[in-house]
Amino acid sequence: MSAPPLKKPVVTEREARQVAEAAREQDWRKPSFAKELFLGRFRLDLIHPHPLPADEAVRRGEQFLAKLHEFCETRIDGALIEREARIPDEVVRGLKELGALGMKIDPKYGGLGLTQVYYNKALALVGSASPAIGVLLSAHQSIGVPQPLKLFGTDEQKQRFLPRCARTDISAFLLTEPDVGSDPARLATSAVPDGDDYVLDGVKLWTTNGVVADLLVVMARVPEREGHKGGITAFVVEADSPGITVENRNAFMGLRGIENGVTRFHQVRVPAANRVGPEGAGLKIALTTLNTGRLSLPASCVAAGKWSLKIAREWTAAREQWGKPVAHHEAVGAKISFIAATTFALEAVLDLSSQMADEDRNDIRIEGALAKLIASEMGWRMADELVQIRGGRGFETADSLAARGERAVPAEQVLRDLRINRIFEGSTEIMHLLIAREAVDAHLSVAGDLIDPDKSLQDKARAGANAGLFYAKWLPKLVAGPGQLPNSFNEFKHEVDLSPHLRYVERHARKLARSTFYAMSRWQGRMETKQGFLGRIVDIGAELFAMSAACVRAELLRSRGEHGREAYQLADVFCRQSRIRVEELFTRLWSNTDDLDRKVVKGVLAGTYAWLEQGIVDPSGEGPWIADTTPGPSAHENVHRPIG
């Protein structure tokens, strides 16, 4: 008889941070351009000349893209998927036959073995036809069974599961719970050892692909016991196992075709052979998987940017106001310029980060996170600007436009579909904290004990000595650099001169590092509570990274004779726009309303401003804020529907 399920853990804020910290990759064994950037060191040599895929990888990738392009044009009806809120089964079967489920899986397991670069190009292509299909393929391969097994699975597990994932089986990743989002220390789903099995109990929320999945990666808590520390652990679970019920297929404001559900586990037996990695390694597996998995979201944002640019170009040339096309009115033209320049920069960030992931010479945990952060924010802004450019037609649905005889342009749908990217796989706010933690890692490594209240005086003294040595060498290097020399980066000086932008990045990387050091000196142990400040630090780093990537990509295209002049123009415009945002962010580091905001929040929660809420009716329905997740058998019909 198995032991009873674990009780839901009650954890303090400090304990939650300790769980997250333990799951981090602690070491930096490879160089990182972005990490160096946050430390004030502009290591252009790490990204320039721009790394390139091998010829064979290009051949294989282009060959698949050609097949996928034809499939998208002839087999996918995005409007139908939006209208019926479901991807037709025959489309999914067609994708299986095409090999799209195995794009990132090694050919020895039946996959296509595409590089990260071409995998992302494929996601951008299919996502432009239907964002829901892009999510289906991404959730399956970026965070579903293939990626964790590729990184942490045994040979036996890879032989058992990867051939299925490559051709026939759809997978899903189950971490989030109704009462657990970005705080995994409170994860309540349990996995209790019982002989050669584990017995799973619990409820998982927002299980993308969960409604149609054949295989699941499930994160569950194993109890501590003699000789075993337990902890959050990863398991591969057959989706049709007895005791698994998909209780609801969730519906959203966008991505209406995704198969996202609520999944309950009641006394589900999982063989110990299906455990991925050791007990307690689940959260680390999840976070490591996301390092490259997050790059799938920028791919969808780049696709949306390309489409927004196309529609903006065609529409503003055809639409006339006051005697000339609206594109020639400055207020509209500025929006078009923003979309064009930003799309170029986001593609530069995506391709550079993806190629670095393929080469595996660099640690890209920060680059991948920055790519996700800036792409999700800028992608949403570009779609919003497109809706504004289209005016009333931007707010009107494609079906309505077609019904009255106009081109069915789904601008409002793209806006709705992109909104989730600012939440998916780490919300913008969580990404700020995650990246900030990595960005200040060097400081905490040498001075962390100084601000840790639990450390002894002896530990603090030792940390103080180490910090003194580190900062004595580091701080003087932040005073001057090549960004102050007028001839630096002259290889980027052609008909359009990008060298001033790279000098700007170098100077402001040092300024960013000085600002971070000053803040740590000022706030010390309270630094982690200054989320507004940390978010702005990260946003500055993201802009500097994007500027660097844009310049490097422009030079690559120029050197290869591929629209080099136009690429330089777009990079120049993006960098000028980015510099304006960077200057504002630096100002807001020290001139902001953070303290006043905290006072207002306290008043709101205390009911001080409740009078402001009067004069409305609340259309919300009745019910708890968070659904009950008490372990036990399901009382719902199972809506799981695997696609054969």
Image (cartoon, helix red, strand yellow):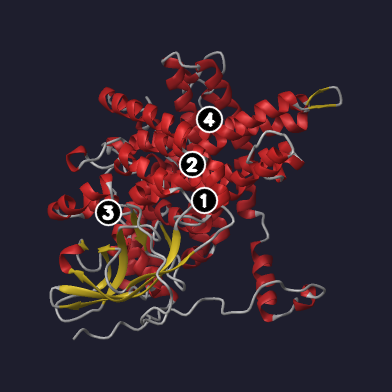
Where residue 592 appears, as percent x and y from the top left, is 67, 57
Asked if residue 509 is positioned above or below residue 15 in the image, the reply reads above
Q: Residues within 10 Å of mark 4 (few under 14, many from 20)?
A: many
**Three-letter residue code for mark 1:** Asn
Q: CA distance from mark 4 to mark 2?
A: 14 Å
Asked which quadrant contains residue 329, the reply is: top right
Asked whether residue 348 is in view, the answer is no
**Quarter of the figure with residue 455:** bottom left
In this figure, which residue is indicated by the disc labeled 4? 344
Kindly identify which residue carries mark 2: 300
Compare marks 3 and 1 and give the one earlier in the sequence. 3
Quote the CA–CA distance across marks 4 and 3: 31 Å
Residue placed at 37% from the left, 71% from the top?
Answer: 245
Circles 4, 3 touching at the beta carbon (< 8 Å): no
- Residue of label 1: 421
- Say which quadrant the N terminus sits in: bottom left
Q: Nearer the viewer, residue 286 or 468?
A: 286
Label 2 vs 3, first from the N-terminus? 3
Q: Are marks 1 and 2 in contact (CB under 8 Å)?
A: yes
Residue 454: x and y in percent read 36, 75
Foreground: disc 4 or disc 1: 1
**Residue pointed to by mark 3:** 148
Q: Is residue 458 left or right of residue 86?
A: left
Q: Earlier in the sequence, mark 4 or mark 3?
A: 3
| Label whose residue precedes the other's in the sequence (4 or 1) | 4
First reached walking from the N terminus: tag 1 or tag 2 = 2
Q: Earlier in the sequence, mark 4 or mark 2?
A: 2
